Image (cartoon, rainbow, N blue to C red):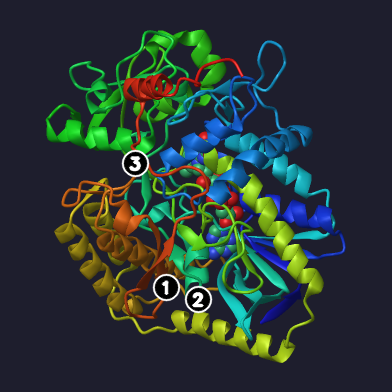
Amino acid sequence: MEIVSADVAIVGAGGAGLRAAIAIAQEDPSLKVALISKVYPMRSHTVAAEGGAAGVIRAEDSLENHFNDTVAGGDWLTDQDAVELFIEDAPRQLIQLEHWGCPWSRTPEGQPNTRPFGGMKIERTWFAADKSGFHILHTLFQTSIQFESIQRFDEFYATDLILDDGQCRGVVAIEMRTGQITLFKAKSVVIAAGGAGKIFPFTTNGAIKTGDGMAMAYRAGVPLKDMEFVQYHPTGLPGTGILLTEGCRGEGGILVNKDGYRYLQDYGLGPPDPWPRKKAMELGPRDRLSQAFWHEQQKGNTIPTAYGDTVLLDMRHLGEKKINERLPFVRDLASSYMGKDPVHEPVPVRPVVHYMMGGIHTNIDAATPVSGLFAAGECACVSINGANRLGSNSLTELLVFGRRAGLGAAEVARRSAAGNDAAVEAKGREAEARIVALTQREDKGESLATVRDAMSSTLEEGAGIYRTEASMKATCDVLAQLRQREPDICVKDKSKVFNTDLMGLLELQAMLQVAQTVAVSALARQESRGSHQRLDFEKRDDERYLKHTLAAYRGAEEPELSYLDVVITKSQPAERLYGGAADAAAAKKKGDDPGAGKAA
Ligand SMILES: Cc1cc2nc3c(=O)[nH]c(=O)nc-3n(C[C@H](O)[C@H](O)[C@H](O)COP(=O)(O)OP(=O)(O)OC[C@H]3O[C@@H](n4cnc5c(N)ncnc54)[C@H](O)[C@@H]3O)c2cc1C
């Protein structure tokens, strides 16, 4: 076992991990940061983000608007103190990126431009054409390499956290190029290892998003919070799951069913406004749009393809000039993968698993209940996304909470005394022994691919867009059986160099643990809220479930659930209204309040 000593170890070099590393380096250059990533930083999933990052900048917008959109978008399951902090820091973080060189698209006057996004009543999404994630990640990466205190460990696969005396003291990882097991000793650790969309069969998520960071924290005793909330994005390409950004609809694209009808007007999102449209319809929140697709499918209004039923995303009316300027990547993707050029033809799309609202339980300082352990980004649940994340809040979340995680970890590292080296190394060796034991398993004929496929298809059947008691129970049973079968999978490749067979098994173990928290948490929540929709409990039930679910690890058993109150500061739960219904409610409120609407 190799040993590397650092002050702070960070698992993950995507948007959140890089932002955390920069914050530490700026705060205290004497702190040594080990930045561990299973892929080169620029291959992290953040690079794939297209649409943009939300932050209030326009004069007609306000922090209050961003707060209200986010809280209502999350169906009141957001922690409002975290949302307040988030919306206030968001513009500062986006301007900071500008100063580090992020090439935001501009208005004719030279200001950063914004585009409308789903569930946001005023446009506030900063973008860099439709390659926003690429430019954000590149900006963070090029900024990070100027700090000597950040040492990168690219292509190191982290497997375990090391705790001693209740304090997080390091991470064990495999150097993928050599198979060498390495113990990173540290005074504090940040997990920024991204989401877990790969537990589902059809997802926009890159192959690396297997929930490793979530599983690591979970096994170390940190509960996973609100895992039942899984976001379906309404416009994925059938077959591949490649995303066509919400920016397509932000720029004016429309969704039609097999009859060319804008069906969203039938689902509380209308009326279809005259052009240019700024509100609801196609710019409703993602949960509502994906649910509307499901209903159209039940009614036989979708278009069957070899890769499932679809509706059409029509952007032809935007014209070639605008599509080339604002959505060049979308044109490229639709043409290459579907043979449909959006300038001339509508593109078939269907809902696709996109984002996990749940994750590692943290407080608003990105600290977990384990001392010295922080988490930020998609692997964490702070929680600003509640039951449904609004598009473009995630990229900003990486910056706001990645930075906070870094500052928290730096503070702990500065005041911590050195740990008990012998105890930490002994625990490192235990983790090493567990990995070595995997490579020595006897061949009992069980197949990794079969178990992985069974896991993802049962999740889609039981924990998809709509859920029922019976379907979720069946999924929980299948997942429990799959966990029993997993120890029978052996690693056939015995070599040390890039042993993808071993990595695949470690990823599967993580995915099974994460998948179980999704299904078990979903079964227990007997209501419909945001992305968690039950056909047997159709209404939101604030009395019983205005609460976060916490799923705690219990070894081979199913997770143990407990509940935590949601933090409410100024927005009491209300009905989520979009489009004309929201306008009518606002007008009524104005009428009821004689003071409203008068000049201040
Ligand atoms: C196609 C697509 C488009 C999107 N578009 C938008 C958008 O326009 N706006 C928006 O706000 N959000 C968008 N999102 C969501 C957003 O991009 C992600 O939630 C966010 O980028 C996640 O960033 P992260 O830093 O948490 O993780 P990631 O960028 O996924 O990085 C995870 C890091 O963890 C490392 N890692 C993982 N496991 C291990 C391990 N075991 N050992 C070592 N390292 C590990 C990886 O190597 C990687 O460096 C999009 C998502 C997708 C999939």
For the point 17% across and 48% down, which residue is it?
Answer: 535
For the point 30% across and 17% down, which residue is it?
Answer: 271
**Residue 337 vertical position relative to residue 366 in the rendered view, above or below:** above
Residue labelled with disc 1 = 552
Q: Quadrant of residue 373?
A: bottom right
Residue labelled with disc 3 = 352
Q: Quadrant of the C terminus?
A: top right
Q: Quadrant of the N terminus?
A: bottom right
Mark found first going from the N terminus, 2 or 3? 2
For the point 45% across and 72% down, which residue is it?
Answer: 493
**Does the rendering let one see residue 238?**
no
Residue 584: image location, x then y, percent: 34, 20
As drawn, is 115 to the left or to the right of 334?
Answer: right
Residue 196: image location, x then y, percent: 44, 56
Q: Looking at the rendered structure, which numbered label has been put on residue 112?
A: none
> Contact, CB < 8 Å: mark 1 with mark 2?
yes
Mark found first going from the N terminus, 1 or 3? 3
Near-viewer residue (152 or 22) = 22
Q: Name the residue type under label 1.
A: Ala
10 Å neighbourhood of mark 3: few (<14), some, or many (≥20)? many
Q: Name the residue type under label 3.
A: Val
Query: Tag 3's secondary structure?
Result: strand
Residue 525: image location, x then y, percent: 28, 59
As drawn, is 510 to the left or to the right of 97?
Answer: left
Q: Name the residue type under label 2.
A: Gly
The Cα–Cα distance between marks 1 and 2, rounded to whole angstroms, is: 7 Å
Mark found first going from the N terminus, 1 or 2? 2
Residue labelled with disc 2 = 221
